[in-house]
Amino acid sequence: MAINRPKGTEDHLPALSPKLTLDVSAQAHGWLVEKARRVLERAGAQRIDTPLFEEADLVKRGVGGSTDIVRKEMFTVYYFGDHGGYILRPEGTAAIVRAYLQNGLKQLPAPLKLWTHGPMFRAERQQRGRLRQFHQVDYEVLGSTDALVDAEAIALMVGVVRELGLTGVRVKLGSIGDPEDRERYNTYLRELFTPQLERLSDDSKDRLTRNPMRILDSKSASDQELLAELGVKPMLDFLGEEAGAHFRAVQAYLTEWGVDYDIDPSIVRGLDYYRRTAWELHHEGVGAKSALGGGGRYDGLAQELGSKEPIPGIGWAFGVERLLLALEAEGMALPEIAGPLLYVAALDEVNVPHAARTAMRARAHARAEFAYRAMKPAAAFRDAERRGAHWVALLGTDEVAQGTLSLKNIRTGEQRSLAAADLATFLQEHA
Ligand code: AMP
């Protein structure tokens, strides 16, 4: 029986594959990451890469023991003689903070801006835009609590969206305050929900003891009904003086820079270590509940991971597949196939090695391919066209003897003869 890929994973396919869509096009993924890289590196972010698997404890402490990610969605890595102490990473932040601490990156000038891209793993139920292996572009800034850093992070996320050409994106901005503010809010929520215990979903009953704020994040329809009925006050009403001033400063910068946002009091980040600024980017094309990305400040994380001193941080992640679905919803076409500039075909078997040599030399200047067997001109043009080539060079006995190439432009039909010695100049001119 044929073996298929695991549920919730996707193959990223080459251009011209049958039934290709943006979200599974390897070229579209590469294009998107390159756009994000340019925006982030222009702002001073440096690339960092961490392993795809980490100590289970990093994920448990970093992401939070009460989150769905840790309780239900972790992929455990086993190998011979090991007891499953490793986890496929579900997100990038905890590992980047670990790498910062472990590699002494604190010595670099602060704030340090880092970015990464790669696969993340969560054993979720597969839906459109919800995969078990998905990809994120991730941006993190370590070493500053300044509201300017928060505003810049949000503006950079919007910058990536603009660079991609997406228009229908909304920024939903909130603040989850400082730990003391959250404690006050959780006390309020406990008092509000305890008399309603029977009406809460099982997950939310559990949340009520572990972390009542999570109830607001519940995916259960009956929980959401109860929330509406009780008229729950938002976290924003519980912000302390400092967190409130920080939140107002972030908004003032965004307004000054012309970055539009909506205050959304319902934003509660699913991860335990977040503080203060929290936000999400949404797009109608991927569904109301599906964020394109989100971010937040996590000043408490480094100490949670064993740092003696606090290292403030803030970061965000985009879901690459979600961005591609949004682009598809806005009607973006697949990126144009970048075919070879030159396709060399020999007309006789004896000249095939010569065609190969010509193409391989041409690669110093441009993308060049060759036919692996002799072809008639019509077959060579057809094959070159299917590969998206621009120019075809035919090599017959005459051409080889005279040191020339017979060139034809597949797209315009233009034909010309070229001295083989002039090929490099020709390619440079047409690249
Ligand atoms: P989070 O790390 O949960 O804040 O997620 C950040 C972004 O990653 C989300 O807004 C989504 O765009 C994307 N994302 C999270 N989980 C998944 C998933 N299971 N499948 C696809 N994208 C996801």
Image (cartoon, rainbow, N blue to C red):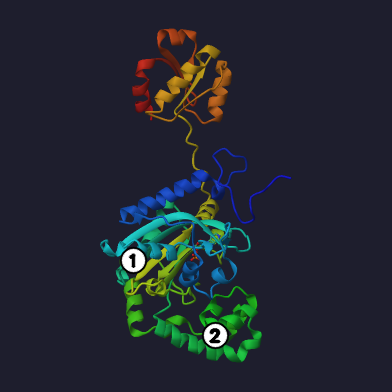
Residue 313 vertical placement versus 395 (above, below):
below
Q: Which mark is residue 231?
A: 2
Q: Residue at x 53, y 30 (%)?
A: 387
Residue 404 vertical placement versus 230 (above, below):
above
* Residue annotated with mark 1: 142
Q: Quadrant of residue 241?
A: bottom left
Mark 1: which secondary structure?
strand
- Pinpoint residue 296: horizontal percent, then vertical percent: 41, 69
Q: Hey, what amino acid is under mark 2? A: Gly
Q: Hey, what amino acid is under mark 1? A: Leu
Residue at the extreme front = 81
- Pinpoint residue 168: horizontal percent, then vertical percent: 48, 59
Q: Residue at x 56, y 79 (%)?
A: 215
- Pinpoint residue 394: horizontal percent, then vertical percent: 49, 16
Residue 259 visible in the current orientation: no
Residue 317 vertical placement versus 354 (above, below):
below
The Cα–Cα distance between marks 2 and 1, rounded to whole angstroms, is: 37 Å
Residue 335 visible in the current orientation: yes
Q: Residue at x 54, y 45 (%)?
A: 25
- Other residues around mark 2 within 10 Å, as few (<14) / some (14–19) / many (≥20): few
Q: Quadrant of the N terminus?
A: top right
Residue closer to the observer: 369 or 81: 81
- Other residues around mark 1 within 10 Å, as few (<14) / some (14–19) / many (≥20): many
- Pinpoint residue 197: horizontal percent, then vertical percent: 62, 87
Q: Which mark is residue 174?
A: none
Residue closer to the observer: 55 or 315: 55
Compare marks 2 and 1 and give the one earlier in the sequence.
1
Q: Residue at x 49, y 56 (%)?
A: 52
Mark 2: which secondary structure?
loop
Camera-near label (2 vs 1) is 1
